[in-house]
Image (cartoon, rainbow, N blue to C red):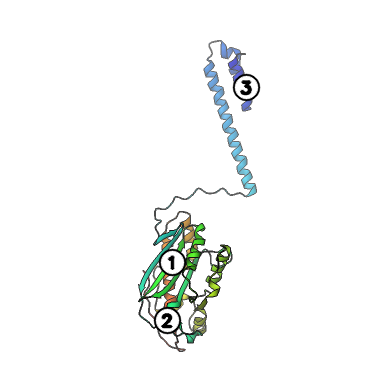
Amino acid sequence: MSALAKRLAGLRRQAGSAAPAAALSTGDVSGGGSDPARALRETGGAYRNDASAAKASREATIAQLRSLLKIRTAPPPAPRSLDRALPGEEIAPGLRYHEQWTPWPAGEDTLPLHGIGQDDIPRAHLLAFDTETTGLAGGTGTRAFMIGAADWRDVGLRIRQLCITRLAAEEAMLAAFAGWLEPETVLVSYNGKSYDRPLLSTRYRLARLRDPLPELRHVDLLHPVRRRYRGVWANCRLATVERELLGVLREDDLPGSEAPGAWLAYLRGGSASKLRRVGLHNAQDLRSLCGLLEALQDVAEGDSRVCTLPVIA
């Protein structure tokens, strides 16, 4: 047997299959008019076919093991949307800051709030705040991806919003929000004592940052609204307060329940259109909080005063 025939026989043994014996005989390789190159091509093709079959067998075995172990194969990444623009500017990696002003009727420098169980509070000390979060149930797995705050400055209402576009920016957002707070700040919220403040306190603790919230006075407007209008209105949701007391009817508003999905879709490369609507929703919540606070200042029971607010476009 020639050296070429021996080499071909070795290839057959490595591939684990046998080519026709006649193709490797001495006569076929070296005599009788046979072409050694043709014999090499034929057995090489058999080797490639055997290698492909072995690869397919391995892939089938891996697929079977994944199925038995219930291991999911990650889907291919979705194509990145071209609509990624968000309002404001990036003030830290993954943290956006957006500020807007809206005209506001001039009022007294101090709000008399004895009717809702509060003392007179200087308007300049009030800070309405609201969060948009990754879930509505709360708990350590829920985080705020947007924090909005509104306060009166000069002759208008200043609305500031922080939004993270990556998980690693949460610490920077918490630090920035803490920088907006002063010892004399009075927080204003709607159900914030039960939801927003505990959630943020948890995130400060997990980020190993000092939590500034428990030190501050906090006016939660949900409780005086319930005391005054429970049984009068169908419910005491903020949307109901807006309609019945403030004359606000939202148009094309994104429900709060869709906010987590809008943010997660953006993180995965999706369009920013719904996340921009989350920002509009948050800004309107803040305007409504400020309007509600003014409407509740020392209002006698049964007073029909309505503070009309335009909707943010």
At which x and y percent is residue 267?
48, 56
Q: Nearer the viewer, mark 3 or mark 2?
A: 2
Residue at image location 62% in from the left, 46% down from the top: 66
Q: CA distance from mark 1 to mark 3?
A: 72 Å
The mark that comes first in sequence, 1 or 3, is: 3
> Contact, CB < 8 Å: mark 1 with mark 3?
no
Residue annotated with mark 1: 161
Q: Is residue 308 above or below residue 99?
A: below
Residue annotated with mark 2: 294
Q: Nearer the viewer, residue 313 or 73?
A: 313
Q: CA distance from mark 1 to mark 2?
A: 22 Å
- Amino acid carrying mark 3 in the image: Gly
- Amino acid carrying mark 1 in the image: Gln
Helix, strand or loop at label 3? It is helix
Q: Residues within 10 Å of mark 2 (few under 14, many from 20)?
A: some
At which x and y percent is residue 185?
48, 75
The mark that comes first in sequence, 1 or 2, is: 1
> Contact, CB < 8 Å: mark 3 with mark 2?
no
What is the number of the mark on residue 10? 3
Residue at image location 48% in from the left, 73% down from the top: 182
Q: Quadrant of the C terminus?
A: bottom left
Q: Nearer the viewer, residue 156 or 62?
A: 156
At which x and y percent is residue 248?
40, 76
- Amino acid carrying mark 2 in the image: Glu
Q: Nearer the viewer, residue 25 or 80?
A: 80
Residue at image location 40% in from the left, 64% down from the top: 98
Which picture quadrant has residue 87?
A: bottom left
Q: Nearer the viewer, mark 1 or mark 3?
A: 1
